[in-house]
Image (spheres, rainbow, N blue to C red):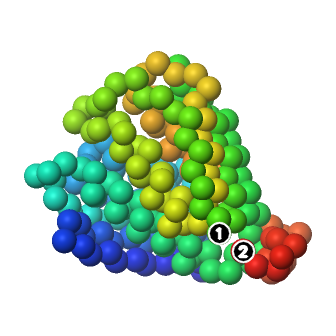
Amino acid sequence: MRRASISRQTAETEISVDINLDGTGAYDNQTGVGFFDHMLDQLARHSLIDMTISAKGDYHIDDHHTVEDTGIALGQALSAALGDKRGIRRYGECHLPMDDAQVRCALDLSGRPFLVWNVDLPTAKIGTFDTELVREFFQAFSTHGGITLHVDQLHGLNSHHIAEAAFKAVARALRQAVESDPRKGDAIPSTKGTL
């Protein structure tokens, strides 16, 4: 099975991530940041990637390091679990509505990290969560996961709905991209022969 475990410890955070790409979307995410845990739960459930994340951070400063370092560790785990990417579909996309919000995601597990982020969260906070951290998470995740990731908000008024639609759209696109393609067998999905 395609699994990976990553531990990351710095002076600011302690993060552990366990994932199974061939899971059912089971999750146990405990970062100490409530809204972020809710978003990680959505990422697991809608990607069908089993995900267990434990994090401790310097919350007395803010949640930035915890969220960013979780993105780093999760990206590293994804990359490790994919290995040489033989037989995967590689690409994924999703248009996802959530009430007033609609977010489009297109991604490529290319090994060439790049984030295009056209999302405008209209409030600075969702509860106590800084909304700018949504982008910070996806920047870290795409960079360390080797993902070309495009996320575009098409509609939306409510910050919670927009953020959740973004996480779910990425999850659904990721689900497609990591799936094994029975027509490819164990071929690497690139004319270069490597990703």
Q: Is residue 3 left or right of residue 7?
A: right
The picture quadrant where one finds residue 78 is: bottom right
Residue 136, above or below 97: below
Could you say which disc has been placed on residue 137 in the image? Answer: none
Mark 1 vs 2, N-terminal side: 1
- Front-most of residues 45 and 109: 109
Residue at 71% from the left image edge and 52% from the top image edge: 92
Residue at 67% from the left image edge and 52% from the top image edge: 107
Q: Which residue is mark 1?
A: 111
Label pair 1/2, CB-CB below 8 angstroms: yes
Residue 111, above or below 40: below
Q: Where residue 23 sits in the image (x, y, percent)?
A: 56, 66
Farthest residue, direction left: 60
Give neighbour class at mark 2: few <14, some 14-19, many 20+ (Cα, 10 Å).
some
Give the quarter of the figure containing the C terminus. Answer: bottom right
Give neighbour class at mark 1: few <14, some 14-19, many 20+ (Cα, 10 Å).
some
Q: Is residue 112 left or right of residue 55?
A: right
Of helix, strand and loop, which one carries label 2?
A: loop
Q: Amino acid at mark 2?
A: Leu
Q: Where residue 184 sits in the image (x, y, percent)?
A: 86, 72
Q: Amino acid at mark 1?
A: Gly
Q: Is residue 9 left or right of residue 70?
A: left
Residue 26 seen in this snapshot = no
Total labels: the figure holds 2
Could you say which disc has been placed on residue 195 in the image? Answer: 2
